[in-house]
Amino acid sequence: MGIRGETGVRAPHGPAAAAPDAWTVATAPGGIPLLGHALALWRRPLAFLAALPAHGDLVAIRLGPQRVWLACDPALVQQILMDPRTYDKGGPLYDTMRMVLGNGLVTCPQNVHRRQRRLAQPCFRPSRIADYATVMSDEIGAAVGQWRPGRTLDVTDAMLDLSARVTTGVLMSTSLAPGVAAEVRGCLATVMRGVLLRAVVPLGPFYKLPTRGNRRFDRALSRLHHIIDGIIAERRASTAGHDDLLATLLEATDDEPAPDACATGRGPDRPTAPPAHQEAPHAKEPLTDQEAHDQLMTFLVAGIETTALALAWTFHLLAAHPEEERRLHAELDAVLAGRPPVPADLPRLGRARRVVTEALRMYPPGWALTRVTTTETTLAGHRLAPGSTVLYSAYVLHQDPVAFPDPQRFDPDRWLPERAGSVPSGAMLPFAAGNRKCIGDHFAMTEAVLALAAIAARWRLRPPSARTVRPVPAAVLSPGPLPMVCELRSRPDGAAPAVPSQAP
């Protein structure tokens, strides 16, 4: 290939590094004719990617006729994420995800991102998150109140149910009907599996064939779009006042008009101010129906699956590490004294937050994401042509023993302030970074900490038998089915938390 062993000027690894050394640029070993590394990436993506930093700081992966560049060093990933005009959202994964999310905040290209961010930002102001936290607490309590001692739950499914209640409660005031919520989850699972397949094995014409899998994917995607369109139409026609995230979103306006590029994802950047000859500013522009559709789809997908899977991983890790679980219970007993958590408790739930953060480090839901170069540029001393696909993996970065000593060990205390400061910039990226950082990061952490506190204060979750849990890397990183038995906890004073009277 002519690039194995190529070197360039390397930025220091970590903030304390004093002098640059040579970057290494290589090609991943083991490619096969025609498919390249697509088969290995499809069969064992985590192991395949995790092995590549040993070969270089920037490693080429061949996916059929295409070449994707994996940035293995945190400094390279920071360079990519902090320069979104050069490294725009794109590549096989994002191109396929646009089939699901349209041009919402997660998938829209940089040239329309500013408008999307301005319109969505009022939904995620700190004052609004505080309002949402009360709804979160109510929905979490209602969901957990249906559990019973001795009952075996699929914790992954239970966390999806819980997160769906929270997300739809915050988003639309009332939760989706149980049947529709279950249908949305089933459709999402089918669609996200199809997204990963189409991203890893980009055989475009094949996915137009009427195979059983393609038909299932098309049906699930069509049903999701139909449900979202119905929600928006109902809200547009409603005269009732609402104080939820969707109301805030639909009421948001922008001083700049919505260009045609918002529908297509292409077009020039809009000016930041009206032309000098314009006598009056343009009328404030609300979201179009298509923009509202794409944002609502984005918030549902991002708000349900990612937080739910982070919580499922958290309970799996706590069950495997009883000493860390005991420390968490001690904090919850001291802060809550047997009552459900409320938003005002969040500042005192430091260990609960560290437990969630460490679970996100070990099993980040957004485990691999891509960018596409918009112009010729240089990365790790290697020239990249316009249209080059660059990949970064939070999972790979979070396993770096330089940034995280003993990375396979579940250690929530690595996020104590005196230790967290030694983590190199760009090494911990559960929510990405730069101006494309997840707008809902504080929302997600608030929900996750409240849910963990509410559940762990009352319940201990135990696997019914010894089993190995292996990550399932679809569009997000899942533990798969996670059966666990609910055991009612006793407080240190001997009192047992009250079990609500609702029927399961």
Image (tube, rainbow, N blue to C red):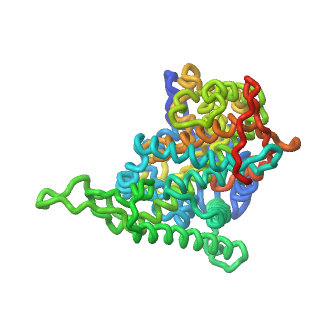
Q: What residue lies at 83% left-to-right and 45% top-to-bottom?
A: 150
Place residue 83 in its image quadrant.
top left
Considering depth in this image, is 36 or 150 the residue closer to the camera?
150
Q: What residue lies at 66% left-to-right and 79% top-to-bottom?
A: 209
Considering depth in this image, is 117 or 350 the residue closer to the camera?
350
Visible residue check, residue 478: no
Considering depth in this image, is 54 or 16 the residue closer to the camera?
16
Across and down, in percent, residue 380 comes to 52, 40
Across and down, in percent, residue 304 comes to 59, 53
Give the total number of marks visible in the rendering.
0
Q: What residue lies at 70% left-to-right and 54% top-to-bottom?
A: 41
Q: As drawn, is 206 to the left or to the right of 485?
A: left
Place residue 339 in its image quadrant.
top right
Q: As drawn, is 265 to the left or to the right of 192?
A: left
Place residue 275 in its image quadrant.
bottom left
Q: Residue furthest top?
A: 418
Across and down, in percent, residue 414 comes to 63, 25
Q: What residue lies at 71% left-to-right and 72% top-to-bottom?
A: 213
**Against 12, is 418 above or below?**
above
**Against 181, is 14 above or below?**
above
